Amino acid sequence: MQIRKGQILDLDITDIAFGGKGLARIDGLAVFVDQVAPMDRARVRIVRKRKRHAEARLVELIAASPHRVDPPCPYSGVCGGCKWQFIDYARQLEYKRQHVVECLEHIGGLKGIPVHPTLPSLKTFGYRNKMEFTCSDRRWLMPQELGQEGVSREFALGLHVPGTFDKVLDIDACLLQPHTGNELLGKIRRYMKASGVPAYGIRQHTGFWRYVMLRHSVAEDRWMVNLVTAAQDDDLLQPLAERLLQSQLRVQAVVNNINARKAGIAVGEREVPLAGQSVICDRIGTYEFEISANSFFQTNTAGAERLVEIIGKFAGLQGGERVLDLYCGTGTLTIWLSQWAREVVGIELVESAVADALRNCRRNGVSNCHFIHGDILQVLPGLQQQPDVVVIDPPRAGMHKKVVRQVLDLLPPRIVYVSCNPSTLARDLELMKEHYRVVEVQPVDMFPHTFHIESVARLERIEQGGQ
């Protein structure tokens, strides 16, 4: 059957592909469709045709999968924040485990690895402790608003349409953050619109208001508001900061990050405190962590606690081990592991993250953690002592091949690999499979209603002559 762009087809969706899209096949050709689930029958329009696959958009749902549910969010299917709200949560967990298994088998050539059922998130809504909202001088309309007269397009404070950098939906409420966050968002939106100062034009690179970042401390139920602007204007921002601090919404810190660059990121070239404190504090287990506007902290606090518990279990520490924590960030995991180890050494490229890690150690009275600021490629060859356990928690791109070789040169008895990307996890495990056996993998869901999944893999060194 010849497939062409613009063609309308009725398809049976048979599977979910990595990336969250539904999968159908026509004479062996894979067709990927957004916003559909296995066992849907869907009418779709082909929007892109390649030699080995095609991409399509949903036109009409002919017959619904039994795994479908009604999404509670009015922006579901239009916003890029969480694409799987229409799929039953128990089924989401199965699909995520399936992604891990398929990546291990097809990318890593690792068959028969015990991959446990996905650990669910304790909350499926209101679980995010950090949300970043974009300001725009042009609002992207919802489908039901198209063609309506009198609909304003002049301002948006919200989230991006999937796959775009310049299309921003004006979001009244995001269900992934606690309700108080949406009240704060409403107050900030009203002030911005009444200020008469324009939102930033993402294409023209003009305007003032750029981003609003909200952080929530789950342990203390306190909030930080980070207002990202194109310039400093204390006369404009100070009244807003005071209003937020004096509201009944438990705001503890209001800061202003100034980003005059064209780059579309919510990190400023400098930061100005506006009201209250400059940090908030949250806890994982018994450990307390200071969180500044731009520091890294897992976005699902309860999920992070489950994740580090699994990592600690897989590390198998008895109290006398030396542990090496690669890509240690602000030291959350380093500090967590310190309670069972003789010594934990963290290596991190970002200098400010190392400073945060040292401060968090002092805050928690932890004295057996040490941090090295530098590129792992340059630091690892100079290590004086062989670690008993290496914990690896790389970015989505995984490890550099040279880092993999350096880890293999260390040849620790145990490795715990923490991954937010099953495909790079599988790729890196394949590079190590001649020296290490993958004993088990535990997926942990930190991001309900998205296709993203964290995985923790336990590796044991293959002794000479072992299998």
Image: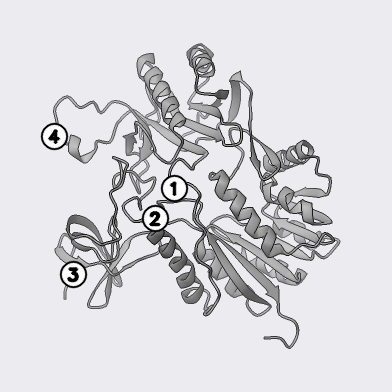
> Which residue position holds label 4?
147
Q: Is residue 254 visible?
A: no
Give how far across and how far down residue 384 sits, in percent. Answer: 86, 61
Q: CA distance from mark 3 to mark 2?
A: 34 Å
Q: For residue 3, which quarter of the picture? A: bottom left
> Which residue position holds label 3?
3
Q: CA distance from mark 1 to mark 2?
A: 8 Å
Mark 1, residues whose alpha carbon is within 10 Å: few (<14), some, or many (≥20)? some
Q: Nearer the viewer's eye, disc 1 or disc 4?
A: 1
> Which residue position holds label 2?
89
Secondary structure at badge 4 equals loop
Q: Which mark is residue 124?
A: 1
The amino acid marked with disc number 3 is Ile
In the displayed structure image, the side of residue 310 where residue 101 appears, left or right? left
Q: CA distance from mark 2 to mark 4?
A: 35 Å
Mark 2 and mark 4 in contact? Answer it, CB < 8 Å: no
